[in-house]
């Protein structure tokens, strides 16, 4: 079977009628660009109640009949067009996904109403609030019938769909156990939306095993797909299955049809050293090579049972820093693919709804996937540099390898934790600053959304504490600058597009890490503010002003920088960074220390 490399266009909006807009996003030119980086499959988010009509629940999505026909036409157009470029189309699903709690559907189908799920959300000012949704109870037979009917209808009406990628834990409200942490796997994590098992209120599902419920959802969806299409693939993503069973979730896997592919995060469930501490890696990471103990256990179980595996990676960038096109940790990427090759894992989903911009990283991934046998690391990286930066002589290529190694060493000091990734300031640090004086205590918002930014960074500290966190940030920023000196010698002044883009992305990454360090140092000074700290604060302003001035010319020339693909917005740009620089200048001038 051919290797599969799944990615998507960074222009596609995950949250807004993605299928309807797909023919406009995936033009022939966009598909050719993806293909040139080795991509042979793309994916789109799909919501069954909006995509296909249902005879079982005809009122599930009012007006869905008209909307679904438009979506199906758009999907057929995309599938046919992508096939001409040798690219398949997968649909990502998180089902059964019911309407909001206030929808008339729940009054009409009270029996289907399952576990109420309270999800912590944030308004546009970053203020948290709770919102209640209802699960569609899969212990009610009609819900399983609906899933099978919908998949059958979908694959009957869209010929040539490559398959389905399904998440059945966490994320949205779906089945009654979707937000119940039965194993206590996420206890103590600040950004944890899950409830304890004793809080389960659905009387039907309370008497059932979550293992059976998750496997049942997959079986019914798979059955509907398979009735209509014998070739399509069903990919079961084991994201957060540790809510229900210890790794590698043998009981869930044993209950699935034999041709279901298991996809597992390559890094999630791993651990690494941060200074003297051992820290958990529970998200995608480019700084941590992996694989995690969890991934290895899942691979072993899949191999034992003759089941095909797919690895989930983020090859462009991750929550570690999502507002640059890529983190140039290509040596780490090579090492990940080396492990996958050794394990016999030939299929990769290489991105989520961000981190998908074409870059050196996506090119490296495509080249590694295309190789029948990976050469040694130095040879592979030299060949990559020769291909991606045409005309770059051997001394320049050697400088690049030194830079990539320095970047990887710097990332050893990244203060990785769910708290820092989800509540930290790295993504927007270049546009963020805390003014002098006492803190107001306002939340800083979600790191992946365009929330209002307050000055309370306490939630992002995790178990490190402020002093230890800033110590690691200092080493990260300094180490990244060492790598940039090699990049500067190799790429600065070259006029080809790849050299300009890779140089700009690496420099701005360094500016972001420096701004993050300065931001936490400012937070430390303003915590328990005293006027005697003003001189130290102004010295910090001077350093940050210099950092902003370094970033501004690159931001003016490259519109990719500062953009976050999940929220489809700019977390920093010339306007916001320029405005911050002007404030810093005013504070410095007021004390006669402007330069």
Image (spheres, rainbow, N blue to C red):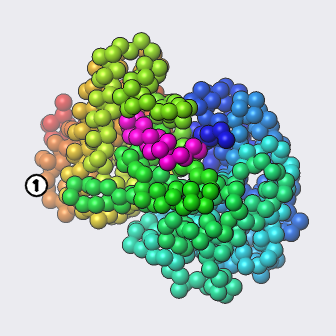
- Asked if residue 266 is positioned above or below residue 462 in the image, the reply reads above
Coordinates of residue 328 in the picture (x, y in percent): 39, 34
Coordinates of residue 62 in the picture (x, y in percent): 82, 62
Q: Which residue is mark 1?
A: 532
* Magenta segment: 327-347
Q: Nearer the viewer, residue 32 or 86?
A: 86
User: Residue 581 falls in which quadrant of the image?
Assistant: top left
Q: State the residue lying farthest toward the left.
A: 532
User: Residue 399 falls in which quadrant of the image?
Assistant: top left
437 horizontally vs 200: left or right: left
367 horizontally vs 580: left or right: right
327 horizontally vs 178: left or right: left
Q: Residue at x 47, y 44 (%)?
A: 342
Magenta stretch: dominant SS?
helix
Q: Nearer the viewer, residue 254 or 447?
A: 254
Is residue 317 something one can see in this rendering?
no
Q: Quadrant of the N terminus?
A: top right
Residue 13 on the magenta segment: no
């Amino acid at each position: 079977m051919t290797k599969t490399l799944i990615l998507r266009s960074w222009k596609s909006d995950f949250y807004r009628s993605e299928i309807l807009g797909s023919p406009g996003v995936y033009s022939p030119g966009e598909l050719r660009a993806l293909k040139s980086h080795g991509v042979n499959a793309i994916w789109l988010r799909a919501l069954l109640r909006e995509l296909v009509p249902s005879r079982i629940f005809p009122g599930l999505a009012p007006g869905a009949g008209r909307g679904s026909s438009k979506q199906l036409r758009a999907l057929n157009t995309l599938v046919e067009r992508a096939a001409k470029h040798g690219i398949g189309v997968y649909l990502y699903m998180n089902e059964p996904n019911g309407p909001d709690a206030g929808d008339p559907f729940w009054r009409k189908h009270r029996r289907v109403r399952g576990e109420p799920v309270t999800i912590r959300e944030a308004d546009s000012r970053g203020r948290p609030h709770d919102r209640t949704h209802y699960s569609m109870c899969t212990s009610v037979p009609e819900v399983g019938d609906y899933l099978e009917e919908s998949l059958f209808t979908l694959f009957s009406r869209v010929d040539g769909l490559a398959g389905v990628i399904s998440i059945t834990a966490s994320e949205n409200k779906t089945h009654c156990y979707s937000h119940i942490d039965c194993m206590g796997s996420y206890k103590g994590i600040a950004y944890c939306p899950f409830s304890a098992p004793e809080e389960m209120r659905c009387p039907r599902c309370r008497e059932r095993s979550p293992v059976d419920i998750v496997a049942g959802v997959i079986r019914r969806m798979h059955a509907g797909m398979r009735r209509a299409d014998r070739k399509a693939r069903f990919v079961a993503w084991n994201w957060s299955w540790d809510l229900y069973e210890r790794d590698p979730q043998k009981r869930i896997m044993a209950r699935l049809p034999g041709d279901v592919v298991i996809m597992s995060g390559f890094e999630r469930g791993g651990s690494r050293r941060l200074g003297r501490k051992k820290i958990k890696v529970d998200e995608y990471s480019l700084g941590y090579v992996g694989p995690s103990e969890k991934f290895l256990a899942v691979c072993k179980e899949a191999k034992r049972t003759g089941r095909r595996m797919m690895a989930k990676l983020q090859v462009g960038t991750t929550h570690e820093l999502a507002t640059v096109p890529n983190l140039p940790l290509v040596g780490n990427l090579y090492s990940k693919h080396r492990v996958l090759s050794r394990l016999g894992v030939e299929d990769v989903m290489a991105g989520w709804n961000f981190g998908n911009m074409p870059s050196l990283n996506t090119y490296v991934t495509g080249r590694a996937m295309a190789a029948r046998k990976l050469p040694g690391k130095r040879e592979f990286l030299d060949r990559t540099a020769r291909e991606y930066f045409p005309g770059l002589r051997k001394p320049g290529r050697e400088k690049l390898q030194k830079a990539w190694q320095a970047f990887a060493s710097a990332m050893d000091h990244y203060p990785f934790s769910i708290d820092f990734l989800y509540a930290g300031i790295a993504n927007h640090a270049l546009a963020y600053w805390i003014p002098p004086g006492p803190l107001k205590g306002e939340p800083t918002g979600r790191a992946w959304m365009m929330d209002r930014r307050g000055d309370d960074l306490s939630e992002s500290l995790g178990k490190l504490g402020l002093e230890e966190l800033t110590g690691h940030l200092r080493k990260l920023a300094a180490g990244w600058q060492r790598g940039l000196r090699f990049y500067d010698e190799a790429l600065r002044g070259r006029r080809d597009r790849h050299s300009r883009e890779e140089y700009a992305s690496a420099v701005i990454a360094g500016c972001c890490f420096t701004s993050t360090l300065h931001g936490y140092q400012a937070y430390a000074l303003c915590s328990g503010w005293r006027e005697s700290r003003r001189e130290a604060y102004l010295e910090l302003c001077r350093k940050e002003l210099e950092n902003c001035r370094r970033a501004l010319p690159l931001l003016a020339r490259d519109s990719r920088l500062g953009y976050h693909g999940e929220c489809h917005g700019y977390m920093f740009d010339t306007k916001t960074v320029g405005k911050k620089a002007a404030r810093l200048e005013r504070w410095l001038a007021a004390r006669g220390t402007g330069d």
